């Protein structure tokens, strides 16, 4: 959507050239039009941050606990795939069983895990640079 709005900026600026004679007013309006989409996007992000804060502060675990739950689900998935299942398959091979436990498909879980780790990494950078808002 931002690209669509950006493609409309030049035509609107050209229309301003035809109808508005005051150079300062024309530049101000051009700037306001050019930054309108960015301001709207920033307002949406800020509104989502407020929702996230309210959810995180909630006392009910089913509202505030979904982020840690997603983290623990990915931890259990990783532990299963790289520790538990290989150990189970080793035990089955030692027992001379024909059964093999298949590995989990991690392609859906990895983007979630990497996104969470990225956010955690940014939080660490905030703390190291002492720009954290915690008192």
Image: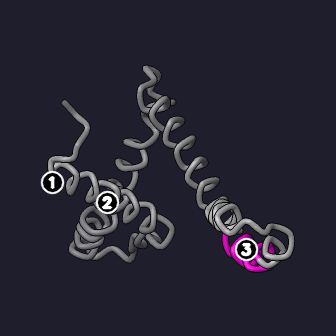
Residue 125 occupies which quadrant of the picture?
Answer: bottom left
Specify start and end residues of the magenta stretch as a single range: 2-13
Left/right placement of residue 38 relative to residue 114 reads right
The residue indicated by pointer 2 is 117
Q: Position of residue 118 (x, y in %)?
A: 33, 62
Image disc number at residue 9: 3
What kind of element bears circle 3? helix
Sooner in the amino-acid sequence: mark 3 or mark 1: 3
Residue 37: tell me if it is visible: no
User: Comparing marks 2 and 1, which lies closer to the viewer?
Assistant: 1
Placement of the N terminus among the 4 image quadrants: bottom right
Dominant SS in magenta: helix
Left/right placement of residue 121 relative to residue 2 reads left
Q: Position of residue 91 (x, y in %)?
A: 23, 68
Q: Nearer the viewer, residue 70 or 4?
A: 4
Tell me the CA gap for discs 3 and 2: 37 Å
Residue 8 occupies which quadrant of the picture?
Answer: bottom right
The residue indicated by pointer 1 is 129
Left/right placement of residue 30 relative to residue 16 reads left
Residue 96: tell me if it is visible: yes
Does residue 79 sit above or below 99 in this rendering? above
Q: Determine the residue positioned at 46% across, 39% down.
A: 66
Q: Is residue 10 magenta?
A: yes
Q: Nearer the viewer, residue 102 or 120?
A: 120
Tell me the CA gap for discs 3 and 1: 38 Å
């Amino acid at each position: 959507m931002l690209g669509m709005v950006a493609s409309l900026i030049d035509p609107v600026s050209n229309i301003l050239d035809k109808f508005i004679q005051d150079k300062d007013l024309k530049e101000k309006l051009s700037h306001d039009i050019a930054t309108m989409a960015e301001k709207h996007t920033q307002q949406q992000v800020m509104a989502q941050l407020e929702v996230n804060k309210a959810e995180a502060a909630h006392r009910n675990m089913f509202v505030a606990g979904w982020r840690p739950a997603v983290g623990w689900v990915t931890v259990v998935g990783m532990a299963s795939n790289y520790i538990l299942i290989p150990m189970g398959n080793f035990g089955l091979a030692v027992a001379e069983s024909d059964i093999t436990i298949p590995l989990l498909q991690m392609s859906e879980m990895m983007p979630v895990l990497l996104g969470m780790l990225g956010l955690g990494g940014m939080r660490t950078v905030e703390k190291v640079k002492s720009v954290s808002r915690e008192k």
